Image (cartoon, rainbow, N blue to C red):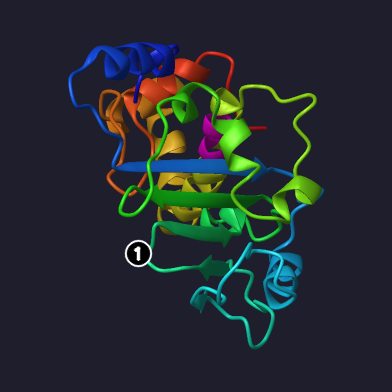
Amino acid sequence: MGDYGWQEKLYQFLNKAQGAKITRLDLAHDDYDGTYLDIDDLNERETNGEFYYFGKPARVTWFGDWKYLDRDKLGRTLQIGCRTSDKMLRAYEKGKQLGDKNSDWLRVEVELKAKHTIIPFDAIINPSDYFINLYPCFKDLFKYDDQVQSKIEYVKRSLKISIEKGVDIFRHQFGRWLGFFRQWFGDDETCIQALAHDFSVPKRFNMTKQDWTRVHPDFCVP
C-alpha cells in the first residue's frame, strides 16, 4: 500500500531511529510465464539439497494435489521451513491460485525473521542482492541483469485474472437476468444505471482502490 519510493523513506527513517530493528522481511520474485521457475523442478532441487548451505534439511510441506500432479489445476505450494524458522520459503502457482487454470505464473516468497540473525536495513533498498543469496540454487535460477520494477505488472496480472473469474461467475449466476434486463430497458446505459452500485470493490475481489488507480484507465480485459 506504500507510495512509490517508500523503501528509501523507510531506509532513511530506520537509520536515524534510535534502537531500530527489522524483525521480519518478506521478499518475493514472480516468473509470470513460467519461463525458468517450475514447482516440480524446485521440489526436485530441494531433494537434491540445493536449498541448504549447511546443516540438516528444513521441514518440507506440500499443499495442493501433489499426488496426481494437480489434475484439477488449482495450484500447488511447496514450503521449505516452518513459521517459527528464521527463514521460510514458499513457492506456489500464483496464476492458478487466482483462478486461471492455464496460467504458468509461479511466485517464490521468502519470509525472514530476526530471531537469531540480523536483517540489515540495506535489504529494503537492495532486496535482489539479498534475495539471490538466500539459497544456493537461486544464483542458477534468477538472472538480475535486466531487473525492472514489476509492481504495476503484478497488479495488472492479478487484476486481469480476478476480473475474468468474476465475469465467469456473473455470467453463470446472472447472465440470463442481464440478457432479459437489456431487452426490458432497451438501452445498455439505462440498464447499467438501474442495476449497478456506485464504484465499490466486491468483498471476494482481492483489489484495493489504490490498485485500481495504478492501472485505470489503461487496463482493460479483452
Please give the name of the residue rendered at 23% of the width and 27% of the height, measured from the top-left corner.
20
Q: Position of residue 106 (x, y in %)?
A: 65, 53
Q: Position of residue 214 (x, y in %)?
A: 47, 17
Pick the residue in front: 188 or 40. Answer: 40
Quick check: 31 left or right of 168?
right
Q: Position of residue 37 (x, y in %)?
A: 74, 54
Asked whether residue 3 is in view, the answer is no
- The span picked out in magenta is 154-159
Q: State the image quarter where residue 84 is shown.
A: bottom left
Pick the residue in front: 185 or 28. Answer: 28
Q: What type is the residue that disc 1 sits on?
A: Arg
Quick check: 183 left or right of 204?
right
Quarter of the figure with the N terminus: top left
Q: Is residue 67 above or below residue 22?
A: below
Q: Position of residue 124 (x, y in %)?
A: 45, 26
What main secondary structure does the magenta stretch of the protein show? Answer: helix
Please give the name of the residue rendered at 62% of the width and 81% of the height, measured from the top-left corner.
66
Label 1 packing within 10 angstroms: few (<14), some (14-19), many (20+): few
Asked whether residue 165 is in view, the answer is yes
Q: State the image quarter where residue 39 is shown.
A: bottom right
Residue named by callout 1: 83
Q: Secondary structure at mark 1?
A: loop
Whether the magenta-drawn stretch holds residue 27 is answered as no
Q: State the image quarter where residue 198 is shown.
A: top left
Quarter of the figure with the C terminus: top right
Pick the residue in front: 158 or 143. Answer: 143
Quick check: 215 left or right of 5?
right
Q: Is residue 6 above or below residue 107?
A: above
Whether the magenta-drawn stretch holds residue 157 is answered as yes
Please give the name of the residue rendered at 40% of the width and 26% of the height, measured from the top-left corner.
121
